[in-house]
Amino acid sequence: MANIGGLSGSTSSSLNSIRGYGGLASGLDRDTLIEDMTYGTTSKIDKQKIKKTQLQWQQNAIRNITDKMIAFADKYTATFTSSTNLFSSSFWGRANITALGANSKYISVSGTANSSASVSIAGIKQLAEKAKWSSNAAVSDKTLSTGEIDPNAVQKLDTLQGKTLTFEYGNKNYTITLSGKDENGDPYKFDTVENVKNSINSILKTAAKDGGMPEDAVVADVQDGKLVLKTNQTSGNNIKLKGGTALEILGFKDAGQDFTEQDITQQGISSKNPLTEKELIKEVSFIDKIAGKEITFNYNGVSKTFTLPDKEELSKSNNVMDTLKDSLQKQFDDAFGTGRVLVEAPLDNGKYKLQFKTQNPAGGEDTSSTLKVVNGSSELIGDGGALNIKAGESNRLNLNAKLSEAGFAKSGNLASLPQTVKINGKGIEITADDTVYTLMEKINSETDVTVSYQEAADKFTITAKADGASGQIKLEDSSGILETIFGSGIPTTDGACVGKDAIIGVKYGDSDEVVEIIRGSNSFELDGMTIGLNGTFGYGDDGKRIEGTEAITFDAKVDTDKIVEAVKTMVDEYNEIIELVNKELGTRPDREYQPLTSDQKKELSEEEIKLYEEKAKEGILFGDSDLRALSSELRFAINPSDLAEMEKIGLTVSSTYSDNGKLSFDEKKFKAALEADPEKVQELFTKSKSDGNANGTDGIATNLKNIMSKYANNVGTMGILIDKAGSVKAPRSITDNTLYKQMEQIDKKIADLETRLKMEQDRYIKQFTSLETVISQMNSQSSWLSQFSGGY
């Protein structure tokens, strides 16, 4: 197969590397003699290679032209998905639509509509509404409060809580944190050596599922009260204990000493001493837990971090809770403004609570503001935190908390879970493990309504997914659980909460008849226009039309800027094609510059070869008959009978013969013609004599489409130039074109000539070898005879 991208076959010099040695006896330059004697064949090979190179250059030059023609066609005449296709109705369509009249404020309009002038909207009787229901009162208790606090309590804490262990497995480090909850939701315990073992194994097991080390890579065990870390793997990666903040407590390193990594084997590594309550448990007072710790609050979207009083200040206080309350109050006032958040510390049965209430600076409760605990030190919030409060709790519902802990205003029925309710006939089970968020997700995914929680308003909104009157909301619940969650007054009967369809009064043409159109949405198609409804007009409260109401009419214009820019670009690209075609067609070749042979290339540098070949390629398509025909057709893309009309809209053909039919484009003229009569401009471009137009001619776009298809069509029947040179835009044509087939024939000739050359070389080598043998024998005989004639 021919190598399309470059020359194929071996070079003349490689063929002329004569085999063997010659001239040893005769003194003849055998290689030069054979090269001279086979010159006729080698010159024929070089000529064929030159011919093939010229064909390749022709092919590339033609493809350069067809690439531009295919791109032109794709952009302007052949591909209907192109936004600049001259035959697309949307290209010429009246896309700039304006609503006119005093009532035009009640609609928005877009789209393409040539018939917009024949349509008017006499009135909008009713807007479409999806079925929607909202809680009639706040659903939360509107209180942000901590749990019970005993400032005199002394708490026993796991010293390992939050500490880390780092292992190396397969040259990669893995760190586990000794905190969290097990698969049953219970907090990990580290108060005894057995609990330490069980918790570490559970954490490692969970980590393995999340991409950590294999489950059997490290296993914790207890021997004689000591913690042992070992592996159950018999082969594979080396495993090491690398470090971590838990090492000193666990007895794997001494206080203040650096840790040296240890290999974990099947025998295991052990803590130095048995682990007892002394190492694993510490007693912490309330003051120790809260002193200097941080907590972050979010007030109406703004987050601020507060620092609690230090240990010295708290220890001197006569009432720790008052000191804590006063400190938080001052920080709230400084962060969000005085009087916006009130901090209280009520005492009940010997236990305190911290309560945070939003209020107006002028006095009175502020029910519109939100206050939330974002995060804080682990000693303050979360499980075991001194303030007995969790991140995410607020004076609104905590969406991530279980329903019983989310902060509903009513919570009595929540103890009766699980319960099954129906929403539009679809059964939904509500369980004690559901959070507000998971319940909303369950309803939204399994029913035909959408539930959302409006935090600022502290209300739920339920919206039907179906548009207009097709949607309704009906909640069925005998347990009362839905009223506990969503509030009282939920729609429980058919028709209690249904959507509405839009009703629009429309007039067509000159008719006075008003046709009422019903749509499920406030956005819909009307005779090619996309209408959006924003309000009602033209109808009274009784639903009757108000006579004399000014109708909304429409004015549609073409997008002149878009069309002008597209035609301007088209003219430029068309002129580029004309210039390229005629440059290739009219450039005379310099016959002294023929393609270089391989031997000639050896004598030149790469830059010299490049410059030479640029010159040699000039005129490669000089006088080509197909290009001459193409040039002629491009010159007359505008029919002579249309020249005057085209000139009126700003398109003229150059009168200079050497311009070969290039076009000039007057933007102002074209834009004015387009604004005055866009349909006429479109016809001058796209008309076809098959349509029976007045002068029986094709428009310029039609002519260009035909020309591009005739010479550069790359789908179905190939265009003339594609058939001649192929194109990467038409894969089948790469090996199915005239020039390729000619190059294939040349390759066959070269192969035949190279075979002949080898035969000639072999024959001459054999003859010269025989000659050398004869001469050698004669020399031997001469030497033998000379020894008998010596001395005479």
Image (cartoon, rainbow, N blue to C red):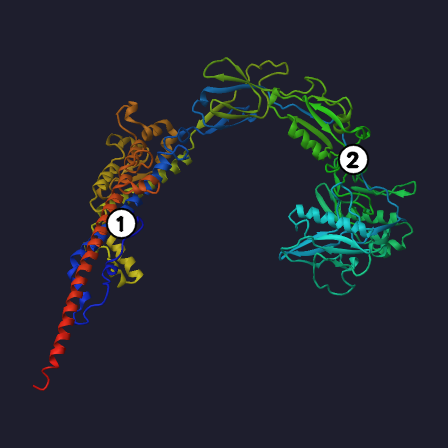
Q: What residue appears at the point 33 percent right and 38 percent down from the top-left corner?
A: 666
Q: Amino acid at mark 2?
A: Gly
Question: Left of 492 or right of it: where is 791?
Answer: left
Q: What mark, if any, has residue 407 been given in the picture?
A: 2
Label 1 crowding class (10 Å Cα cut-off): few <14, some 14-19, many 20+? many
Q: Are marks 2 and 1 in contact (CB under 8 Å)?
A: no
Q: Residue at x 31, y 50 (%)?
A: 5
> Is residue 51 visible in the rendered structure shown here?
yes
Res 340 → quadrant? top right
Residue mark closest to the camera, 2 vs 1:
1
Q: Quadrant of the C terminus?
A: bottom left
Q: Residue furthest left?
A: 792
Residue 767: percent from the left, percent from the top? 16, 63
Callout count: 2
User: Vertical placement of 634 versus 758: above or below?
Assistant: above
Vertical placement of residue 242 versus 704, above or below: below
> What element does badge 1 sit on?
helix
Q: Is residue 723 left or right of residue 567?
A: left
Residue toward you, 9 or 522:
9
Alpha carbons under labels 2 and 1: distance apart: 82 Å
Q: Nearer the viewer, residue 312 or 493?
A: 493
Three-letter code for the amino acid on which mark 1 is drawn: Trp
Q: x%, y% of residue 257?
A: 76, 65
Q: Tell me which numbered mark, 2 or 1, is placed earlier along the sequence.
A: 1
Q: Position of residue 21 (x, y in %)?
A: 22, 67
Q: Which residue is mark 1?
A: 57
Q: Secondary structure at mark 2?
A: loop
